[in-house]
Image (cartoon, rainbow, N blue to C red):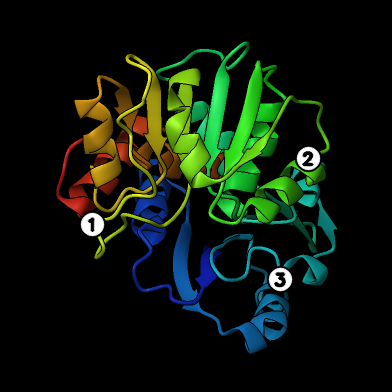
């Protein structure tokens, strides 16, 4: 019998996960299909029960359900529980277990450029769900420090207070972070600012950026945001969100099938859909 996998969210039409995962199932000759389902907030409980009832082997969870889904699962792994968000669910013999592959996916993508975060001075821009996943994951990698810069400084402080792993961190406004960008080896932009269609926006000015620092923007549409263009102009190395997207998907695929897939194939497939090339 063909196995069912899915992604649930609202909206969901833009998701490239079905294209990416169905290609992998075909490539590895796995008799499975991956379908997108638009699920409203008020229907989330019923959607999870339905997927469980029909024997779906696993599914991804995207906005706005990553936190709201937790009470409807049978179990949540430690990292996902500490982050407070789930993006991957595995049906383990009738029990739904939630994981978060966003942070680990970001880390694997980062390691293409920076083999280790140990000793690095890092600032994360934003304090939302993606920032939380990345912050908690990097905190375990022995960085020198990870600061959080956010429009609302209280939210940045709350994120730091929630981190269960020991790491030196301070909260800054975007204005203060902007003045002190020269202190950091790694700058990670996690907000939606600059994503299509608002492509001429960026969260802060990068004129004080440290030359040869590494700048990540987790946005991948457009492939090169104004933020990344500004970073290049300031002499930094840059990375867009394609690597994080591909690796979080690869880690989900591995949890479902036991196979860590061909990430280059995944990347080329996504880039083909976006009509661009790797940043």
What whole-number distance in Å separates the C-alpha atoms at marks 3 and 2?
20 Å
Q: Residues within 10 Å of mark 2 (few under 14, many from 20)?
A: some
Q: Which residue is mark 3?
A: 68
Contact? badges 3 and 2 (CB < 8 Å): no
In the image, is residue 138 above or below residue 255? above
* Quadrant containing the N terminus in the rendered view: bottom right
Q: Residues within 10 Å of mark 3 (few under 14, many from 20)?
A: some
Residue positioned 57% across, 71% down in the render: 64
What whole-number distance in Å separates the C-alpha atoms at marks 3 and 1?
30 Å
In the image, is residue 66 above or below residue 83? below
Contact? badges 3 and 1 (CB < 8 Å): no
From the viewer's perspective, is 66 left or right of 272? Answer: right
Rendered location of residue 208, percent (x, y): 35, 26
For numbered disc 2, what is the local secondary structure? loop
Rendered location of residue 51, percent (x, y): 65, 74
Rendered location of residue 104, percent (x, y): 60, 35
Q: Which residue is mark 2?
A: 163
From the viewer's perspective, is 203 left or right of 227? Answer: right
Earlier-in-chain disc, 3 versus 2: 3
Rendered location of residue 102, percent (x, y): 57, 44
For numbered disc 3, what is the local secondary structure? loop
In the image, is residue 158 above or below residue 66? above
Front tag of 3 and 1? 1
Please say whether residue 247 is visible from this viewpoint: no
Residue positioned 28% across, 55% down in the render: 201
Residue positioned 75% across, 25% down in the render: 167
Q: Which residue is mark 1?
A: 199
* Quadrant containing the C terminus in the rendered view: top left
């Amino acid at each position: 019998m063909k196995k069912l996998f899915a992604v649930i969210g609202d909206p969901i039409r833009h998701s490239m996960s079905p294209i990416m995962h169905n290609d992998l199932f075909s490539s590895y000759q796995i008799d499975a299909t991956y379908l997108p389902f638009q699920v409203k907030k008020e229907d989330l409980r019923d959607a999870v029960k339905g997927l469980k009832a029909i024997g779906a082997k696993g599914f991804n969870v995207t906005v706005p359900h990553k936190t709201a889904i937790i009470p409807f699962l049978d179990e949540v792994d430690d990292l996902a529980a500490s982050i407070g968000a789930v993006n991957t669910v595995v049906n383990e013999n009738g029990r739904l277990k939630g994981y978060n592959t966003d942070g680990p996916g970001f880390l694997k993508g980062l390691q293409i450029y920076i083999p280790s975060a140990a000793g690095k001075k890092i600032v994360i821009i934003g304090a939302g769900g993606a920032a939380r996943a990345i912050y908690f994951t990097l905190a375990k990698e022995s960085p020198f420090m990870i600061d959080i810069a956010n429009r609302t400084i209280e939210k940045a402080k709350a994120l730091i207070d929630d981190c269960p792993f020991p790491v030196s961190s301070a909260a800054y406004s975007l204005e203060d972070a902007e003045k002190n960008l020269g202190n950091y080896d790694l700058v990670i932009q996690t907000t939606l600012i600059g994503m299509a269609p608002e492509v001429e926006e960026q969260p802060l000015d990068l004129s004080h950026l440290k030359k040869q620092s590494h700048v990540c923007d987790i946005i991948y549409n457009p492939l090169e945001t104004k933020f990344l263009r500004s970073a290049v102009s300031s002499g930094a190395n840059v990375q867009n969100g394609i690597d994080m997207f591909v690796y979080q998907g690869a880690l989900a695929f591995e949890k479902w099938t036991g196979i860590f897939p061909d990430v280059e194939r995944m990347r080329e497939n996504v880039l083909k859909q976006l009509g661009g090339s790797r940043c």
